[in-house]
């Protein structure tokens, strides 16, 4: 089973992907995380993309697409992928279909997490990620445990694009590109919309219910 999960910034794509991959033994392919790694490692690609990322814009389709083929081509990953944050527009969705087709695979389910801008602002401002294990917390809704070796406050990091201004710009970028992407996946009857404003475990349960339904 290959899955796509999309939604506005702060919708909970990363958080939910991490639950789903554990439960169904899948691999998460997050283009956002892959791009942040390039910036952190100060690669040439990292230098080229940092200004687009820090202004809430998308990097080019060519760059984003270039990151995913090495996973799709791996035998170990075959039919076991969650694409988190890819595709972000119709062109990328078409590219993804072509790439999957090349390796005799397809998308089985597309999940859209719906969340309003008001909720997103709070989620983004409060978000912090543990630099050791990658777990995502929120100081308002889901604070990190106080007595934890791994996720203690000194290991929690804010993303540089998690500011109010950039989050609004990221939301606008999302809104601008999303309609054709929704139409594309509605046409192929793969799209399921999930209310991303419920609490984390309610969303996970709803997603699990949908996955169990398509597994039959
Ligand atoms: P995310 O971690 O999914 O919120 O992505 C963070 C940022 O990475 C986005 O605001 C974009 O600048 C960039 N990015 C992530 N995925 C893509 C993609 N599929 N296409 C273009 N840019 C992307």
Image (cartoon, grey):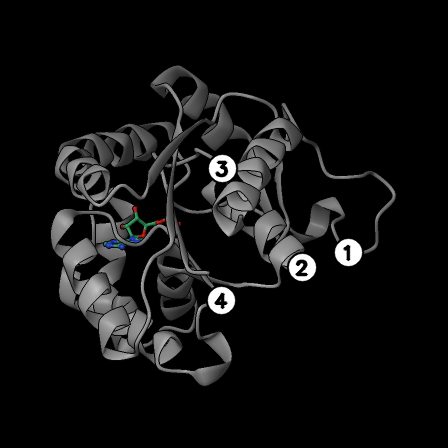
- The mark lying in front, picked from 1 and 3, is 3
3 or 2: tag closer to the N-terminus: 3
Task: Inspect this view and state whether residue 48 appears.
Answer: no
Seen at 45% across and 84% down, the residue is 75
1 or 4: tag closer to the N-terminus: 4
Dot 2: few (<14), some (14–19), or many (≥20) neighbours within 10 Å?
Answer: few
Seen at 76% across and 47% down, the residue is 152
Residue 198: image tag:
none
Label 1 sits on residue: 150
Image position, residue 129 (x, y; %): 59, 48
Q: Is mark 3 within 8 Å of ligand 1?
A: no
Kindly check if marks 4 and 2 are in contact, taking CB atoms under 8 A apart as contact. Answer: no
Label 2 sits on residue: 133
Up-down relation of residue 50 to residue 170 (above or below): below
Q: Secondary structure at mark 3?
A: loop
205 relative to 118 in the view: left or right = right
Q: How many marks?
A: 4
2 or 1: tag closer to the N-terminus: 2
4 or 3: tag closer to the N-terminus: 3
Up-down relation of residue 58 to residue 117 (above or below): below
Q: In the depicted view, which residue is nearer to us: 214 or 76?
A: 214
- The mark lying in front, picked from 4 and 3, is 4
Image position, residue 119 (x, y; %): 45, 19
Distance between the Cα atoms at labels 1 and 3?
21 Å
Q: Secondary structure at mark 2?
A: loop
- The mark lying in front, picked from 4 and 2, is 4
Label 4 sits on residue: 80
Label 3 sits on residue: 12
Q: In the depicted view, which residue is nearer to us: 1 or 65?
A: 1
Seen at 58% across and 57% down, the residue is 21
Distance between the Cα atoms at labels 4 and 2?
21 Å
22 relative to 26 in the view: left or right = right
């Amino acid at each position: 089973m290959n899955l796509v999960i999309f939604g506005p910034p702060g919708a909970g794509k990363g958080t939910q992907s991490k639950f789903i991959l554990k439960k169904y033994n899948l691999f998460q392919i997050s283009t956002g995380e892959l791009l942040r790694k390039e910036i952190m490692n100060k690669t040439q690609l990292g230098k080229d993309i940092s200004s687009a990322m820090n202004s809430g814009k998308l990097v080019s389709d060519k760059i984003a697409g270039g990151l995913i083929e090495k996973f799709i081509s791996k035998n170990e990953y075959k039919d076991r992928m969650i694409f988190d944050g890819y595709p972000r527009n119709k062109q990328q969705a078409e590219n993804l279909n072509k790439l999957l087709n090349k390796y005799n695979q397809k998308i089985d389910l597309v999940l859209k997490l719906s969340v309003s801008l008001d909720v997103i602002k709070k989620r983004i401002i409060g978000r912090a990620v543990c630099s050791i294990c990658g777990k995502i917390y929120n100081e308002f809704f889901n604070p990190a445990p106080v007595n934890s070796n791994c996720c203690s406050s000194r290991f929690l990091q804010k993303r540089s694009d998690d500011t109010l201004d950039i989050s609004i710009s990221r939301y606008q970028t999302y809104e601008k590109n999303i309609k054709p992407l929704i139409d594309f996946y509605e046409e192929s009857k793969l799209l399921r919309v999930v209310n991303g404003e419920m609490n984390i475990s309610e969303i996970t349960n709803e997603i699990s219910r949908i996955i169990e339904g398509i597994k039959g």
